[in-house]
Amino acid sequence: MSVIAQAAAPRRLARSRFTFDRLEVLGPLFILPAILYVVVLVGLPFLLALYYSVSAYSIFNPSYTFVGLKNFREVIDSEIFRRTLANTLIFTISAQIIGLLLGKIGAMLLMQEFPGRRLARALIVLPWAVPVSLATLAWVWMFDSLYSVINWTLVAAGLIDAAHRPQWLGQEDLAMIAVAVVHAWRLFPFGVVIFLAGFTSVPQDVLDAATIDGAGFWRRNYQIILPIIAPIIMIAVIFGTVFTFTDLSVVYLLTKGGPINSTQVLGSLAFQVGILSGDVAHGAAICLFLFPFLLVAVILLLRSLRRREI
Amino acid sequence: MAAVATKDIRKDFGDVAAVDGVSLSVRDGEFLVLLGPSGCGKTTFLRIIAGLERQTSGDVLINDEIVNDITPRARGVAMVFQSYGLYPHLTVANNIAFPLKTQGTPRPEIKRKVDWAAGLLGIDGLLHRRPRQLSGGERQRVALARALVRNPTVFLLDEPLSNLDAKLRASARSELKQFQQKVGTTTIYVTHDQVEAMGMGDRIAVVDHGKLRQIGTPSEIYDHPADDFVASFLGTPPMNLVEHNDGLLGFRPEHFLPREMLDGAALSELPFRIDRMEYLGSERILYGALDGFHAKREVTAKLPAHVPLSGIRAGEWHKFAVREAELRYFDRDGRRTVSAKEQAR
Amino acid sequence: MPRAAGKVVGQSSFYAAVVTLVVFAAFPFYWMLITTFKTDGDLYNLKSIPYWFNAPPTLEHLKYLFEDTLFVQWLSNSALIGLCVVVITLLVALPAGYGLARMPGRSGENLSIGIFLTYLVPPTLLFLPLARVVTLLGLQDSMWALVVVYPTFTIPFCTWLLMGFFKSVPREIEEAAIVDGCTVVGAFVKTVLPLSVPAILTVVIFAFTLTVQEFVYALTFISSSSEKPVTLGVATDLIRGDIFYWGELMGAALISSVPVAIAYNLFLDRFISGITGGAVK
């Protein structure tokens, strides 16, 4: 290769060009901007969050006094926070379960050929495809205290007395249900897509072999297909869990955390405390409770990715 | 153990007939090879026999009973796929055990049968491994063990050697044949490789474009091909076919020799212009053209290498000949006909 | 015949299941659609059947939306932000993905997983300190803050996606170009990039839709109405006091959602093969 380069250009130029114009040298340079971006705008803010959480920083008192773990202790002591943590877990787990179930059912239905299948798939994907805030607004309207179409339907079907219309966003337990429903609604199309991908990735030979070996529909599904696509499903579950656990938009727009902080989640509480109330230190502390959870998710994800490689 | 038969099986995909009226029967314990080029419908046909696909019309019979509506498992067929179709998440032992588990076989019997099948195929040491840890040859044996373990009525094999590298293929071929002879199960084996077919089959069924061209023993197929397709599909290099009398005249390269090598009467002399020669160690292939005959491909002659090439040079004409008994005649539709002389005999 | 009857039951329960799922997924959008075109009188009437028009459909909400609100401004903000973020993402992720794909050994793979993991660090963890950083940069209350911050979640995923793709492009092609006299960058641009159009398209669609959907950072950094992207503007500015302008709200939501939904559908198949592409060797 050097012979060709030397034949084409003056010797000195060719040599210096050869030194720099190699993938071994340029490769790391190519990667650098991405790493820088991530370090500066993700890594540093993260460290900053840690820093704030152990300080007494607030909008009104921007001082960097070190207070140790005081913020964390105060946060944990707060009943609102404990309720918030519980909510976050409840919403996340329920959304995953429903999302997975509906996702699997939906994928199995969409695997069949039937007229209108493409349209059905496009419609089913909609909740996940459109911006969270806009979709949530539609649900706010659907849960409206006076004009809720859901209530109207329930009354018209004779299931509810017109005088006792449920206040979806105004009553504690109903609000919890409302948030859970919106989360599950957003998540299950993602599940459908992932399961579809998984189902189509199983080699036909393996399915045929299972048929020949006498495995009926259910056995094929639970003993052959599911174990094979488990790593892909795992990855999807981890992502889905992270989406729900770290959500702020749905709760903020649907209930603003109310009524009376009963539907707060970590994200929305952190926003309320850190931005709306200006108490950056405590807000940061609340945010950081997301971290151990994320760490676990990351570790699980790595393990699933490794297994998938095999 | 069973005899398998098909009556006029048709399979249409839209306008295309993938299988176009195939009837054949396989004797109990026989090793039948379905031979044909890629896309000729042989795999589809095999899958119909297995029950994985439903034929458009026609019947599949096992032991004289029509099984069209019966599931693969109930037909008792076992199949080995081209990529083996092993369950990637199960150990070798569990792969082999799977067909027994679906039938509710009790645990101790499962273990006994798995050990027996693994022993027969020499893979007892691999029982705790997973498919991804095995070589191609090992995976094939696991697939065979899984097929064997429930005493199937018939083995269906879909090009099981094509994923092995060439060196392994020859030994795997003879091992497979010996295995089948030992076990004695009726076997239908699909391949596009005529060497495999000739080497393994008790009978060969040649298939093209969904139609059965000829079924017979290897020597019947080779020496007495029913049409020009069969004639040119088998044999390396393929049979020479030249236009003659509104039909085709065929002769195999190994029968096309220099005049001086053949003695006796009943010879057809054919002047041969040699364009080039290949020396392959054990034989020589000569490529060229015949005087006065038109052919689609180069005419070839195959000489054993130990024969001296006196006077035979590239670029020259030489007198070659074929014994009349080795000439084959085909009519304009490609079907084999007998010459007047043969009829007289 | 019992078998035929069983088949009918099976088929109808199949279709029932499909319809139920589709209705569950799509009804809110139907609701958006119909609300947009209903008159206020029809909307806020407890007596009327909500599922269809009781008065003739109207364009008054859309008119109000386009003429009397900053909706058009928000849409163009979102579009501009999206465009800029896509450009930044491509500029950073293309070389990064290529560099990682061509790195020898497993170090490239590991580094890419590291970058990919940052995708999991959510806005709800970072928005607080980033708000301070944005103020420090003087970008508070400006949509350019979003242009700077959004690539933090598009770059990781897109780099990983592109790396996977570039790995599948055989090295021989670039090597042939280099032997013919190209520089490394030249070989990349002239040989690999033209082959990568589908992957680049995927990245563009993905980055754009992700950007246009974002809410948390927008909510945190921006308060001036004219700087808001559409997701934020619609959620905050179409509410006066306690009164929700539902007709306008739903109209805005509908108009903003449709292009994103269409883009997603185009992108879906690629996304699937992206996720399983590594799994199905």
Image (cartoon, rainbow, N blue to C red):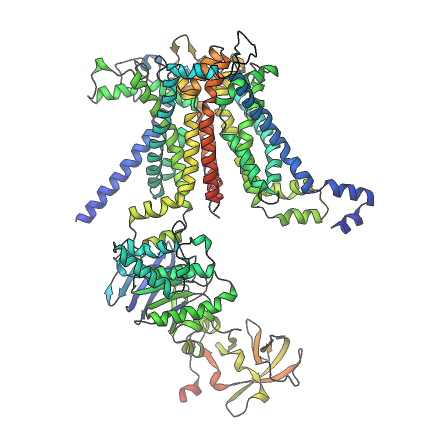
Considering only vertical position in the picture, is A29 above or below C171? above
Q: Position of residue A89 (x, y in %)?
A: 37, 25
Q: Which residue is more in the foreground, A28 or B119? A: B119
Q: Nearer the viewer, residue B250 or B140?
A: B140
Q: From the viewer's perspective, is residue C273 above or below residue C250? A: below
Disc tally is: 0
Q: Residue at x 29, y 62 (%)?
A: B58
Query: Which quadrant would residue B127 be assigned to in this image?
Result: bottom left
Q: Residue at the spot x=50%, y=27% of the render?
A: C121
For image coordinates 35% across by 63% down, the residue present is: B117
Q: Is residue B27 visible to us here?
A: yes
Is residue C200 visible in the rendered image? The answer is no
Check the image and name the residue furthest to the bottom.
Answer: B264
Image spot of residue A278 (x, y percent): 49, 10
In-front residue for pair B85/A5: B85
Q: Position of residue C128 (x, y in %)?
A: 51, 18
Residue A301 located left or right of residue C110: left
Instruction: Name the residue furthest left.
Output: C1
**A241 to C130, vertically: above or below:** below
Measured from the top left, where is residue B329 in percent x and y?
46, 79
